[in-house]
Every structure is written in structure tokens, then in C-alpha cells.
Image (cartoon, rainbow, N blue to C red):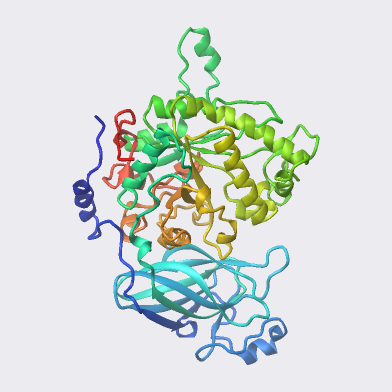
Amino acid sequence: MKKRKTTALLISAMLSISALTFPVGTTAAAGTEIKVEFESGTLTDCENREPITWAQIDEDGFGNVCDMKGWSGDSYVYIDRKDAAATVTVNAPADGYYALNICYIQCFGNPEKPDKTQYLLVNGESQGEVLFPFNSGKGWQELPAGYVHLNKGENTITIKSYWGYTFLDYIRLTDAPAYLTSFTPDDAPCNPNASTEARKLYAYLRSVYGKHILSGQQEYCGSHNYNKDAWKSQGKEIDYLVDNEAEFEYIQEKTGKQPAIRGIDFLFYNTTKAYEDDAPERVVAWYKDKGGIPTVTFHWNVPTEKGSSEVAFYVKSAANGNNFTTFSAANAVKEGTWEREKIDADLENLAKQLGKARDAGVPILFRPLHEAEGAWFWWGADGPEACKALYRYMWDQLTNKYKLNNLLWIWTGSTSAHASEWYPGDEYVDFQGIDKYNAINNNDPNPSAISATFYSMVAQTEGRKMVVMSENDTIPSLENLLNDKAAWLYFCPWYQRYLTELTDPAELKKIYTSDYCITLDELPDWDTYDPEL
């Protein structure tokens, strides 16, 4: 019988690290409101070291673009260049979560990239990013910027420049809704006909949500199982999980453990360019032979243009000189287009491959059309309405036409001000995910648990959907996860350097061997696991 975590073990382990216990945290008392002017804080690495007045802005000629009149307090501040930062001190009446609102003007956008993203730090620790929408001509506006965990007493909140060129007036903190920390997601998958295996997996994940984090790892894509023919020639049964297991061998070497979740990409499964790397077979083997949980990503390769035999998934602006595609997501959901014909063929092929797992009784955490809002992939390049229509069409085809009831669906979104415009709808989604890439200068580990990002994702569905770290670079440290009360359902580093260079080996071992983290050997036996469905 595999070891299963218990609440007693969890609390014991946690008390050795901090005084926190899960369910994580509390929300601020009802009626809380704290307002702090940015001019009361500190500017770092800015051209204008002192708060900028209307007169100064007007003299600089910016008054013709940005109507700065009507600010609160004595003045406001301006973060412009890279690494500029504005920090304010907040005295919180109690430990807990607070809704963060920022009064701002951002009037230097352009038609292609009108919005500006900045970094958010709480008490010096990275909490993710805040997107400030372009609002020229609208005056000062309050932006709901998510939720932050504050300690009782003095705290600092910093807005640090990523894009810069944003004026900041004040922050206002209010109490957060109770659902933020209740951890009571939907009690069943979005597909009412989900298979028994899918419902069992969903029930298990729901049972550990807010109490543990599951370990995950994305496999290196595209060079697996080159020895398959050699296995066949020797009359041996093929082991689909034996070749090129660098990430999993690394984790075993450093921790003595294996991840509970294996990320597998169906990158090569399309009807334009024939190549297969046995990804469906690895999905089945990971669950049936190892007892693990498979999650499938689909970098959907399509023709670079009509009639081409070359494929790509990046659009031109993101291709870095490599192949790119002009394939239209908007056209793909229109009957009679060549794009529709292509995606129908691809979905039929994809269903055949995913059907291998269904027929073997294997549930899958399925993550299509990820990172759409970034618009670097073709499925996001035509905007939110086209992407949502494509996602819903895909859900309908795979669920209703091809009867892939073994799929649990993940929507990989964001915490931007536009995130709700992209969300396909609760009836099509089981989990909310976010892909975390915030390593320092893309080279040094950043072990932040980005709790503000986590709770912003929770809030988007008012707690109805479990929230996962669907991809990441640095794995958040155990201490940060517990101290910041960031209850991610799982983490899943991308392959190669994202694992080996961007997470400290000592921190990797610490989290993998903790009672808070669930590893492969600690999953239930799926054949005998019998939750109340």
C-alpha cells in the first residue's frame, strides 16, 4: 500500500518550519479599508526623485497626453525606466489577505502594445505582475490588482518597473472575500459524463487542494524512445519510459523521489507533418505502470500558410527568425474555410491518440490553447473571442463527438486586467492554471511562491476552480509556500535548464522530501482508490 499523507503529518512538518497550518490564511476583517499615498513612500532609480507635480508634468509637455488633474493627496509618483520602483509602507491591523487597488494613469501606450506590465513585491518578495491598461484621457482610475498577504503591523508594497511609464497616485486595501481561503472548488468535473477514472482523479485532487502541493515535471520533448526498434529486435516488451529521462533521473539523484505528475507534449501530433514520438504511449505507461498522473500540453502545429507542408505554432512576432504561421483562429471556427478543414482533421487525429489513454482507463489533465493571452501562439493572435470559440469547439468535439470522457480540462490564463475576457467559462474548465516564468534576469532562481498571483487566480472564479502552476521555472521554496500561504495544487517545471539551473538542488530536495509535497510513491493506488463520487 502506498504511503498517503495525513493531516497530522502535515501539521507536524509545518510546525517545524513555521507556525502556519492549512487551510491557508484568513481574510481581513469586514469593513477594512487602508489608503496610502505613493508620495509618502520612496522612489528608487527614477529620473525624478521627488514626487512630480502637475506643473512639472505640464512644463515637460506631457499634459497634452495625460490629464493629470484631480490626484489624491499632495501629489503622485512616476516610474519610468527599467528597475525604477515606488515603495509604500502599510500598517495592517491583522495578519491576512487584502484586496489591493492601485490608482494610476498610463497614457504612453501604442496601438500594438497599449498596456504596461509592472512587477509587484510585498515585503521585498516577488508576487508576480500587474498589468496597467492604457487609459489616456480617462484621468485617474483605480485598478483591482489582486490580493496580497500582509502581516500584522508594518509591511511594504512595491511597484517595480517592467515596462515603466506609469503614474501612481495611491493604493487602497480592503478586506478580501471569504471564498478566497475556503478551498471549496466544484465538487465534480465540468463534463457531466466524465469517466470513473477522471472523477476519481478529480476527487483525489480536490481532497488534497489547500493541504498539499503535488510535484510535477515536464519531460523533454521530441527525443524519447529512439531505442524502440532495438527493444523490438530483441523480442523485449517496449518500455516507453526508459530513454532520455534526464529530468527524472536528475530529480531521483537529488531527492531520492519521483514527481507525482508527468508533463507530456503532443507537439508532433498533427496531420500536416508526419512524425510521432510515442507520447500517447508514455501517458498510458506513466499512469498504468508507474501509478502517476499525466498532464498533456498541446503545442498545436499548423501549416505556416495555406498549402504549406511546413508547420509552426508561433506567430511572426514571436518566431525569432524561425518558422511562423499566419493560420487564423477566427477562421478555424468558420465552416467552409481551409483552416476549419485542417483543425477538424487534426482533432480527429488528436482524438485517436488521446483515445489510447481513454481505452486503457487513463485520465489526463489536458491543457490545450495555453498562454493564449500572450498572443505569441496562433490560437491567441486573433484575440479573446476567437480563442474562446476555438477552445469551446475543441471541448465539444473531443467530449461529445469523440467521447474523450477521460479528460480533465485546464485553462492556462493570467492575472491581467483582461483575463476574464479570455476565460472560456466554468462549464468548459476544471482547473485554472498559470505559467510562471519569473527567474531573476532569466538566469537566477526566484523561489517566490507568488501568493498574490495564486489568490488573484482563485478570485477569478470565486474559488470554484482549483488553481495550478501549470508550467514554471523555479519551484517555489517550501518556506515561501508555507509562509506566504500559496496553496498551488501542483508545480510542473519546464524541462532542461528550467529544472537543473533555476531551482537550487538543496531547495529541490527540501520540498520533495517534505510532508507538504506529494511525490509519486505517495499517490494512492488508483485501482483500489475509492472516493465518494
Residue sitting at x 46%, y 27%: 284
Q: Residue 472 or 509: which is nearer the viewer? A: 472
**Can residue 376 be seen?**
no
Residue sitting at x 36%, y 52%: 477
Q: Is residue 45 above or below residue 520?
A: below
Q: Residue 348 or 518: which is nearer the viewer? A: 348
Work out which residue is located at the far right of the displayed protein and give it.
Answer: 307
Q: Is residue 259 above or below residue 451?
A: above
Displayed quadrant of residue 118: bottom right
Q: Residue 471 or 210: which is nearer the viewer? A: 210
Displayed quadrant of residue 112: bottom right
Along the horizontal axis of the image, is 389 left or right of 435?
right
Q: Is residue 258 above or below residue 54?
A: above
- Give x and y (percent) for residue 347: 63, 34
- Give x and y (percent) for residue 439: 49, 54
Quadrant of the image for the N terminus? top left
Residue sitting at x 25%, y 57%: 21
Along the horizontal axis of the image, is 440 left or right of 489?
right
Along the horizontal axis of the image, is 54 left or right of 506?
right
- Give x and y (percent) for residue 341: 73, 36
Q: Is residue 147 above or below residue 491?
A: below
- Give x and y (percent) for residue 25: 30, 63
Along the horizontal axis of the image, is 528 left or right of 274?
left
Quadrant of the image for the C terminus? top left
Question: How many marks on residues?
Answer: 0
**Can residue 126 be seen?**
yes
Displayed quadrant of residue 154: bottom left
